[in-house]
Image (cartoon, helix red, strand yellow):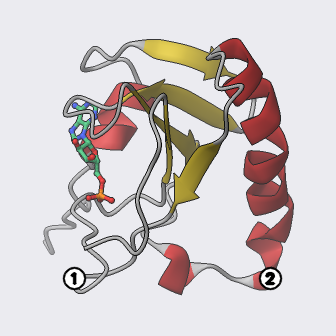
Amino acid sequence: MAVVRMPEKTIFERIISREIPAKIVFEDDHCLAFHDAHPQAPVHVLLIPRKPIPSLEDVVSDDAEVLGHLLSVVPQLTKMLSLTGGYRVVINCGQNGGQTVDHLHLHVLGGRPLSWPPG
Ligand code: AMP
């Protein structure tokens, strides 16, 4: 009998299913936001879709609604996080983009002036 291997769950899927803990700051039917374990700014939150889309490169037209939803959540999230002075939203994609977790995520960074360009 053929062995069917299930793809490994990413760490973010394990956070969604509560298999591993995270400091969750927001969630709804489509997404979840939690503090980054290695913050790069005083406020560093990750906003992820519940749907396990591996990266921006894997987005298809059916994902437009969920991606639009993620962006629409950002202002709610940044108000909750008191990022009144502005903030940055980043999506790393692929190896050269610095992506390390294969579950699409938005970094929301703020709480200090952020330099440009990034490294
Ligand atoms: P990226 O490098 O764009 O794929 O971002 C992945 C982010 O996930 C990094 O900023 C990590 O610090 C963060 N991260 C990895 N594991 C965890 C975790 N268990 N809880 C919170 N953040 C995490």
Q: 65 or 114, which is in the foreground?
A: 114
SS class of the residue under badge 1?
Answer: loop
Q: Locate residue 69, reporting x and y percent.
A: 82, 49
Measuring 39% from the left and 69% from the top, which residue is drawn there? Answer: 92
Measuring 67% from the left and 39% from the top, which residue is drawn there? Answer: 86
* Horizontal side of residue 114 vs 106, given as left or right: left
Ligand 1 appears in which quadrant? top left
Q: Which amino acid is tagged 2?
A: Ser
* Horizontal side of residue 49 vs 28, given as left or right: left
* Horizontal side of residue 79 vs 114, given as left or right: right
Measuring 31% from the left and 79% from the top, which residue is drawn there? Answer: 97
Q: Which amino acid is tagged 1?
A: Gln
Q: Residues within 10 Å of mark 1 (few under 14, many from 20)?
A: few
Disc on the earlier residue, 2 or 1: 2
What residue would you read off at disc 1? 95
Q: 7 or 34, which is in the foreground?
A: 34
Q: 85 or 106, which is in the foreground?
A: 85
What residue would you read off at disc 2? 61
Measuring 38% from the left and 40% from the top, which residue is drawn there? Answer: 13
Instruction: Find residue 18 and report its image quarter.
Output: top left
Q: Locate residue 85, reporting x and y percent.
A: 67, 32
- Numbered disc total: 2
* Horizontal side of residue 27 vs 17, given as left or right: right
The Cα atoms of the two marked residues, 2 and 1, are separated by 23 Å
User: Viewer-nearest of labels 2 and 1?
Assistant: 1
SS class of the residue under badge 2?
Answer: helix
